[in-house]
Image (cartoon, rainbow, N blue to C red):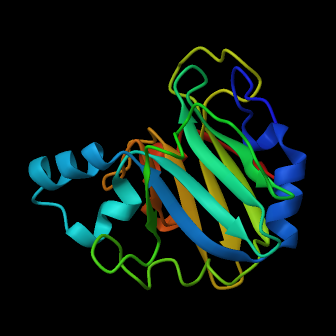
Amino acid sequence: MIDEEYRFGLTESPEIVKALKQHTIKNIVRAYNKITLDDYIEKDSHIPVTSFFNRIPGVILLYLDNDDIIGFAGEDIKGSVVVWFDTKDGVHDYTTYYDREYFSFMQHNDITYADKDNWSDIVGHVVTNIQVLKVDRNEKQRMPDSLQRGIILETPNGNMLISFCLRLPNGGVLALNKKSDITDEIWNCTEVIQL
């Protein structure tokens, strides 16, 4: 596969929506730069270490039961969470969002930097509902999938919010949270797109 100039948001990626709703999520992995983690440890000592998985900058990878991997990243130009098949039918995609050779990989249940039970309602389950949050703060929409700052993935057991610069109280650049963490201030300027 060939890297595109910009990846698409989930509203423009029906194959990925279909894959999420047909396959069980086996694992959630954060691809990150080791230097970034060291900076977090040094500068954010007030933050519980077990929340680093949810907060440190880096790509989110969802591993599916058919061995495909879906990548999520923040795209500055669009102001959106963008998605792609990081691995599809055994073929790795090239992406500029992270470097497989250079980046480190952290599991959702990492014994040091994650709360091992935090995503147990997502891992081992199929996504049954997807909502994209288009957050308009009077910014210019450059592309049809611009300003899509959040993706809510729901299973019968729980939910996960993947957000990019959503300005959550306990968020990060590309953060993992629960839907209940979204403030009224954010909901008030959000259009919910049901997929």
Nearer-the-camera pick, 189 or 131: 131
| Quadrant of residue 159 within the rendered picture | bottom right
Horizontal side of 40 relative to 71 (left or right) equals left
Expressed as whole percent of the image width and height from the top left, the position of residue 132 reads: 69, 48
Q: Residue at x 43, y 47 (%)?
A: 103
Q: Is residue 171 visible?
A: yes
Q: Residue at x 62, y 79 (%)?
A: 123
Q: Residue at x 48, y 58 (%)?
A: 30
43 w.r.t. 22: above or below: above
Which quadrant of the rendered structure holds the N terminus?
top right
Horizontal side of 132 relative to 111 (left or right) equals right
Horizontal side of 37 relative to 137 (left or right) equals left
Expressed as whole percent of the image width and height from the top left, the position of residue 16 reads: 82, 52
Q: Is residue 182 visible?
A: no
Q: Residue at x 65, y 18 (%)?
A: 141
* Count of number-bearing discs: 0
Expressed as whole percent of the image width and height from the top left, the position of residue 51 reads: 30, 66
162 w.r.t. 178: above or below: above
Expressed as whole percent of the image width and height from the top left, the position of residue 170 reads: 31, 56
24 w.r.t. 9: above or below: below
Nearer-the-camera pick, 8 or 193: 8
Nearer-the-camera pick, 148 or 182: 148
